[in-house]
Amino acid sequence: MKETLALIAQASSIQASKGSVATYIPELAKADPEAFGLAVTECDGTQYLSGNCEFRFTLQSISKVVTLALALEERGKDNVFSAVGNSPTADPFNSIMRLEMDAPHRPHNPLINSGAIVVVSLLPEEGREGKIEAILDMARDLMANGDIKVNDRVYRSEKNTSDRNRSLAYFLRSVGSLKGDIEDILDVYFRQCSMEVNAKDLSILGATFACDGLNPITGKQVISPQTARIVRAIMTTCGMYDGSGEFAVNVGIPAKSGVGGGIMASVPGRMGIGVVSPPLDQRGNSVAGLAALAAISEQLHCRVL
């Protein structure tokens, strides 16, 4: 396994030159385009690391699965999916068009921006501080890392450049699909996206979902098996933005990407995979990360679809 991952990392990292780092959030534009880390955590706790697995980056949209898991645990499946759908969309992750066109005016799924904002609003904790602390606690438990925190520079950069997300939130409120203090909800959303991790953390996150909610490093049952299965299902259909269908065909593993360059994948009953490489394709997915996961799927026979 170690040698195979090293070869995959070497071949995949070269692909990064075909992408570009995100620039619409100024702090993300500062990311090292040559950074690459690949980590695997198996369900027995064995770990394999290749490349720079200490390189730190922000979760961005990968944080949506953390908050979704928390909402499912605290509010239950029926409450969550009465507020957001569970269907894929071919539109970009920050699109407002489908919200306007479709009735009822609710987000198609919890892994696009509008859906993730609604999921934050469902958390029962009081105020922005209560909600973000609950999300951080869940992230720390899922990834076996008590030191996970918000990168304040990225948070402020994101908060100052998020007119589209504000538009989504206020539109959702105008049609009755979002309740609560909009600025509080958005502040929590910006901070959850700015949680800072590394590739090893991502692999543990994927492994915890793969092991039906049992963290293989700590031995703690963090979430219920049902919640883990729901999150894996949503990742399978919606986890890679508007490239989810193509990824399902080519790779066939439940996964979630973020514009910070990370991708987390979860092979049920076997392993979690974390990969980071900041240069992205036009859909917002890490170019080298996609190449690495395609190679892992083929060479380690990880395809579940």
Image (tube, grey):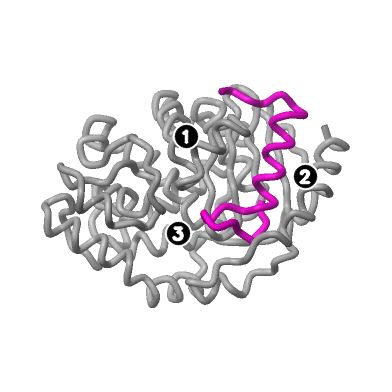
**Residue 275 magenta:** no
**Residue denoted by label 3:** 193
* Residue count near mark 2 (Cα–Cα under 10 Å), binned few <14, some 14–19, many ≥20: many
Q: Nearer the viewer, mark 2 or mark 1?
A: 2
**Residue denoted by label 2:** 49
Q: Residue at x 72, y 34 (%)?
A: 296
Front residue of 100/146: it is: 100
* Residue count near mark 1 (Cα–Cα under 10 Å), binned few <14, some 14–19, many ≥20: many
Of pointers 2 and 1, the one earlier in the residue sequence: 2
Callout 2 amino acid: Leu
* Residue farthest along the right direction in this orientation: 3
Front residue of 92/135: it is: 92
- The magenta stretch spans which residues? 276-305
Element under label 2?
A: strand
Q: Position of residue 234 (x, y in %)?
A: 42, 34
Is residue 168 shown above or below 271?
below
Of pointers 2 and 3, the one earlier in the residue sequence: 2
Q: CA distance from mark 3 to mark 1?
A: 21 Å
Q: Position of residue 93 (x, y in %)?
A: 40, 53
**Residue denoted by label 1:** 222
Is residue 268 shown above or below 170?
above
Q: Are marks 3 and 1 in contact (CB under 8 Å)?
A: no
Q: Are marks 2 and 3 in contact (CB under 8 Å)?
A: no
